[in-house]
Image (cartoon, grey):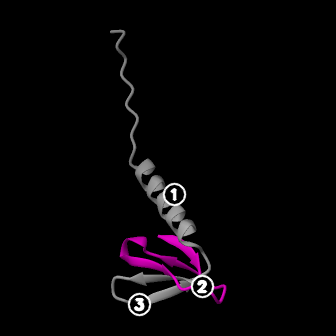
């Protein structure tokens, strides 16, 4: 989930997997799959960056390091 800021300056968490599309009207409008929408202060580029950062963190959590000793 990513943190966004409504036009009223209220912060909220958004499940980015439920985003259908993002529009600029000139505010940024995030339209969800159920057709609800949020007007937010962040730009489209900000939202894309937050989604990429979140996905990178999730993938990094599942990364495992394997150490093998080949001297034997």
Instruction: Look at the image and say whether residue 64 sits in the magenta stretch.
Output: no
Q: Earlier in the sequence, mark 1 or mark 3?
A: 3
Give me the residue at 39% from left, 40% from top. Answer: 64
Label 3 environment density (alpha carbons within 10 Å; few <14, some 14–19, many ≥20)? few
- Tell me where the magenta segment starts and ends, as one range: 1-26
Q: Which of marks 3 and 2 is nearer the N terminus?
A: 2
Label 2 environment density (alpha carbons within 10 Å; few <14, some 14–19, many ≥20)? some
The Cα–Cα distance between marks 3 and 2, rounded to whole angstroms, is 14 Å
Which quadrant of the figure has residue 22? bottom left
For mark 1, give the secondary structure: helix
Q: Which of marks 1 and 2 is nearer the N terminus?
A: 2
User: What is the x, y in percent for residue 47?
Assistant: 53, 69
Q: Which disc, if any, is residue 53?
A: 1
Q: Which disc, if any, is residue 36?
A: 3
The one of 22 and 12 positioned closer to us in this rendering:
22
Which quadrant of the figure has residue 8? bottom right
Give me the residue at 37% from left, 71% from top. Answer: 17
Label 1 environment density (alpha carbons within 10 Å; few <14, some 14–19, many ≥20)? few
Residue with the mark numbered 2: 6
The Cα–Cα distance between marks 1 and 2, rounded to whole angstroms, is 20 Å
Instruction: Look at the image and say whether residue 13 sits in the magenta stretch.
Output: yes
């Amino acid at each position: 989930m990513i943190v966004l800021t409504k036009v009223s300056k209220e912060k909220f968490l958004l499940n980015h997997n439920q985003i259908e599309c993002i529009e600029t009207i000139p505010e940024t409008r995030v339209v969800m799959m159920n057709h609800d929408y949020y007007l937010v202060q962040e730009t489209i580029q900000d939202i894309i960056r937050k989604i990429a950062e979140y996905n990178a963190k999730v993938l990094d959590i599942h990364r495992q390091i394997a150490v093998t000793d080949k001297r034997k």
